[in-house]
Amino acid sequence: MLPHRRLLGLLVLAAATTLQADWPQWRGPTRDGHTSPNDSLPRSLASEPKVLWRQPAGPGLASPLIVGDRVLVFDAQDGQETLRSLNAKTGVETWRHGVDVPFSDSQGPTGPRNTPVANGTHVYAVSCRGELQCRTLEDGHAVWRVHYSTNLGAQFIGEKGSAQGASRHGNNSTPLLDGKRLIACAGSTNGASVVALDALTGGVLWKSQNDVAGYAAPIVGTLAGVRQYVCFTAEAAIGLECETGRLLWRHPLKTAFGRHAATPLIDGNHVLISTHQAGLIALDIRKNDDVQSATPVWTNREAAMNFSSPVQVGVGIYGLGASRNVVAVDAATGATRWSQDGWYTTPKDKAYGGFLTDGKTLLMLTDGGELGLFALEDPDGSSLGRAQVSGANWCNPAWSKGHLVLRDAKSWICLDLGP
């Protein structure tokens, strides 16, 4: 039998290796919408892409993952929010396990809204009500579970009164897997707004802050020389020291019902956040003795991104703007570089786009099920093609080796976009 430390090291190595390939978490291998370095997007888009497989989907808003020869999906099946593994080549289901009873409100279908995260050995999923489970990737066997309310003290209210953020519309913030730590935005106002759990055992490593959880996913990066977790709660954007959870900086920001859903981006020493009311904001993070400060350096209200998360390539930030327009924003100044209309017809507060990039092209899935491909090397972001591929959705597609996996209300769909 391998010594525990060596086994842990091998598991962490397997996780790190897997996270550099495929699409093992929300927004891809680096959690920012970028594909793996050697996994390019197409340079043109056929009007009718080839469908490799299509499988029935249950209700839900969780996006798919691609991990090796598996596609992991999270949807409602037989009265349960259910984690399932599909064969990546055929779409045939290989295992399924119920996680929790589904949650229902006026904002979406009765099913999970939180995209799972996986490594080479395990997959982690959170239900709308806050049931976090770790299961083996091989067969979905349960390893451990933690409940945000029962175990960590978070309050889940539902769509009632003035309930804010995740306590109102369910847990949407997909956890962050960072080596041996799993970072979860539990949302307890009793010192466990953000928690670090042991990824192998579920044990609590540290707890921090008292904020209600927002919907945005946490990210990790180095700001002003300190590696840290950036979280966008229902009350503020915050930076936490990785090893201890100690608060490094805090930028208070409150909007109606704490609807903070867009995943932040890190650009050098800037953190980019966005809400439907405050706009797209760049925060400058600077060291101030043993802590750090966060100072807004620019705001672009016209490019306010509601609950679609942007991607960044060089000095360009690309996403869905306040007027249902595809926008490119200068990361240094906040000025809008270009804007394109005609892609979205849904109401402004419901419009959603899923964005992917390889640094040269931008691939977008609209909420109406249309794919659009843009040339980022063109100063005006010229179109390289568009194709209707699904029905209505709020999905961030998963990409791997020329294949795109997405969902709509009826189906999980795998497309071949390769040459």
Image: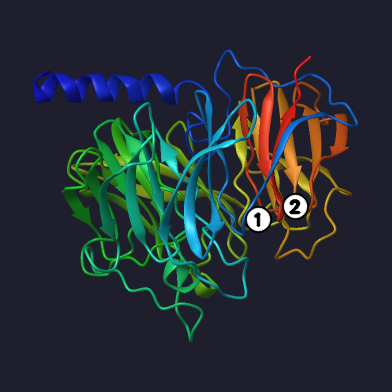
**Residue drawn at point x = 89 percent, y = 49 percent:** 342
Which SS class for mark 2? loop
> Where is mark 1, residue-wise?
304
Residue 62 lies, in percent from the top left, at: 55, 51
Query: The disc labelled 2 sits on which kind of residue?
Result: Asp
**Do we see residue 140 in this rendering?**
yes
Snapshot quadrant of residue 146: bottom left
Above or below: residue 126 compared with residue 5: below
> Where is mark 2, residue-wise?
367
Q: Earlier in the sequence, mark 2 or mark 1?
A: 1
In the image, taking residue 129 as reference, residue 273 lies left or right, namely right
Q: Nearer the viewer, residue 210 or 184?
A: 184
* Outermost bottom residue: 161
**Residue drawn at point x = 31 percent, y = 39 percent:** 228
Q: Nearer the viewer, residue 130 or 411?
A: 411
**Residue drawn at point x = 29 percent, y = 19 percent:** 13
